[in-house]
Amino acid sequence: MKFKPRNLREIAEAVIGDTLIGDIRPFPYRSSSYITRFFEECDLDFVHDGSTRWSWTADRLAELLEEPQAGAHTLPDRFIHTLRVLMDKADAVDGDTDRALALATLNKPLIREGWEAFYGEDDHLQVRHVRTKTVSHMPNPHRPFTPEELRRRERLVKFLDVCSEDQLIEEVLLPLFRQLGFHRITAAGHRDKALEYGKDVWMRYILPTQHVIYFGIQAKRGKLDASGVSQASNANIAEIYNQVLMMLGHEVFDPELSRQVLVDHAFIVAGGVITKQARNWLGGKLDASKRSQVMFMDRDDILNLFTVNNLPLPEGAGESRSRLPDDIAF
């Protein structure tokens, strides 16, 4: 994807703070070192080389626009993230406390390219395609990572190596699924072993049509395989089989709808690897209808989604943690 040079320059001038409306500067002025610092905040390893600020910045924005898009009528996710950092409401200036001037300034070049920026209900910037109304908000977990993202990913790997299943759920999966747009994520029943399996353990996702899909999650801290004997660091897929059947047949009460609903899909999530043999074994045990209801997420999926969504790392990620024995049904 390419923007016209005029429009790239106007966005670049917003990044470096050269925009002036009357006596108000809606974006903070950034000298060479502060331009580099801005891109560091965007998790990008761009270092200003001392050349003309707007020209160099426009070239970097053009590079971001050349990256793969997450879907049709969307902008590349690192370009979107850069705009979100630029438009953070915490950076509002006197005379533009609601950032209306900054938003209008950014929208001039964007609208000429067929896009429109706006603030969502969470006060985070969103960008939509004017003609189709498609919102660019889904980061691509398969794009190349920056060196800084790779460092954060490695810290999360170390955390997953030593965390308990409670920590996997509470510090990694819950924030991740909330960021991905799931609602009413409930982990009750895990700590209280007396509760019936599946009791109040569910989350839901609202489709653009306003239909609601319900999900259950079965999480294990380590590897899931199809070996004959489970070891301390892994679990046998056969142990998951009955839990998945119970999950798909278990009703949950949705208080917002005031009725009982069935779980539509089951996520099997592992903090380690889910082997191909384990997936095939479970697929052979489930009938065709239930196979379509089961989805897998292993360590790579967690790492990639956590990284591209720029979520804060769990407290102490990358540091030594003691293992806490646990058995979780989530």
Image: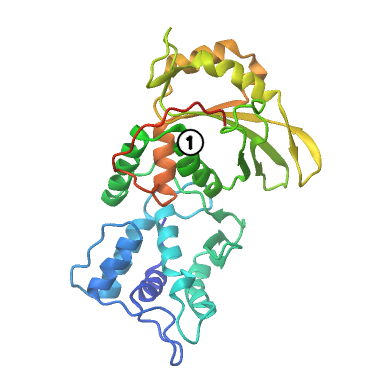
Is residue 109 visible to us here? no
Q: Where is residue 280 in the image (x, y as percent from the top left)?
A: 49, 14
The picture quadrant where one finds residue 142 is: top left
Q: Could you tell me which residue is drawn at 53 percent across and 69 percent down?
A: 111
Q: Could you tell me which residue is drawn at 41 percent across and 67 percent down?
A: 4
Q: Position of residue 212 (x, y in %)?
A: 71, 41
Residue at the extreme left of the image, as rendered:
50
Q: Could you tell me which residue is drawn at 35 percent across and 39 percent down?
A: 159
Residue type, label 1: Asp
Judged left or right of residue 187, residue 155 is: left
Q: Position of residue 59 (x, y in %)?
A: 30, 64
Judged left or right of residue 231, residue 133 is: right
Residue at the extreme top of the image, as rendered:
228
Judged left or right of residue 215, residue 100 is: left
Number of numbered discs visible in the structure rendering: 1
Q: Give the color scheme: rainbow, by chain, secondary structure or one colour.
A: rainbow
Q: Quadrant of the C terminus?
A: top right
Residue named by callout 1: 166
Residues packed near mark 1 inside 10 Å, few (<14), some (14 to 19) or many (20 plus): many
Camera-side residue of 151 and 125: 151
Is residue 244 visible to us here? yes
The relative height of residue 164 versus residue 5 in the rendered view (above or below) is above
Judged left or right of residue 241, residue 224 is: left
Q: Could you tell me which residue is drawn at 67 percent across and 24 percent down?
A: 248
SS class of the residue under badge 1? Answer: helix
Q: Where is residue 194 in the image (x, y as percent from the top left)?
A: 64, 27
